[in-house]
Amino acid sequence: MPMKDLPAELRPREKLLERGAGALSDIELLALLLRTGLKGQGVFELAAHVLREFKGFDGLLRAEAADLQRIKGLGPAKRAEIAAVVEMARRALAQPLRDAPVFDAPQKVKDYVGLQLGSRTQEVFAVLFLDGQHRLLEFELLFHGTLTQTSVYPREIVRRALAHNAGAVILAHNHPSGVAEPSRADEYLTQTVKSALQLVDVRVLDHLVVGQGSVLSFAERGLL
């Protein structure tokens, strides 16, 4: 049934305003954002299809623009709105890291990095640059690779750390295979970058490896 034909108390917008967002199902929340469906496919059916394709909101929030394009019914306007919601989520997760030391919210660091890197189909390497009080200055994707590996240049990380006047960094990369376990190469790279940054008095606080739905911390594993 089209949304406009529903009784007022069952329409997502009215339901949200009356009872709060928590009263809506996942399908209703997404349908409210999408607003319209396709010919022969109502907005609720489209919302259900999108959530199935991305395995819920977690996958949808990690999706890239190219991933959204494969869904019939998600035209430029709908893709732009979803991308805007994703960016708002990323900024919301980043805000506490800018306002207080990252050690005050270690899970938020994992959530933020997971949202940034979790859906990528190629390996990428990123750095969170922190100030002297370990608050987030900037998140940068520095190196892009293939499905299984990327080339990382410590000299470039040092250069960017100096440009940001960073006092510390957190390294991060993804494993498109979905397995977050660090490799020997990951461990060697971490020590190489750590040694390079020590020369300019910048600490490596952690190295996060992002897999499918999980983020592994070198610091928690005692690997730093």
Image (tube, helix red, strand yellow):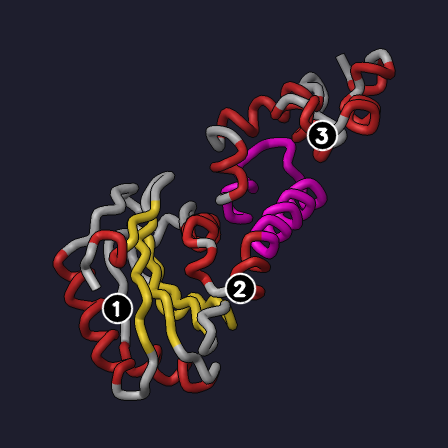
Identify the residue at image location x=41%, y=79%. Answer: 167
Left or right of residue 73, residue 107 in this image:
left
Please report the residue visible at 41 percent of the width from the left and 86 percent of the height from the top.
162
Nearest to the observer: residue 202 or residue 174: 202
- Examine the structure image and report whether residue 71 is included in the region drawn in magenta: yes
Measured as percent of width and height from the top left, residue 216 is found at: 29, 49
Q: CA distance from mark 3 to mark 1?
A: 44 Å
Q: Secondary structure at mark 1?
A: loop
Q: Is residue 195 above or below residue 64?
A: below
Camera-nearest label, 1 or 2 = 2
In which quadrant is the N terminus drawn? top right
Image location of residue 204, percent across then percent down: 31, 71
Q: Say whether disc 2 or disc 3 marks the residue closer to the N-terminus.
A: 3
Q: Tell me the mark number nearer the camera, choosing from 2 and 3.
A: 2
Q: Residue at x 19, y 74 (%)?
A: 192
Read off the residue under disc 3. 21
Which amino acid type is marked by label 3?
Ala
Give the main secondary structure of the magenta stretch. Answer: helix
Find residue 134 and report its image quarter. bottom left
Q: Reply above or below: 44 against 55.
A: above
In this orientation, which residue lies closer to the viewer: 66 or 162?
162
- Residue 131 image offset from top left, x and y in percent: 47, 76
Q: Residue sitting at 52 percent across and 61 percent down? A: 97
The kind of residue tagged 2 is Ala
Circle 3: element type:
helix
Residue range corresponding to the magenta coloring: 63-92
Mark 2 Cα-neighbour bin, 10 Å: few <14, some 14–19, many ≥20: some
Name the residue carrying label 1. 151
Q: Residues within 10 Å of mark 3 (few under 14, many from 20)?
A: some
- The first of marks 1 and 2 along the sequence is 2
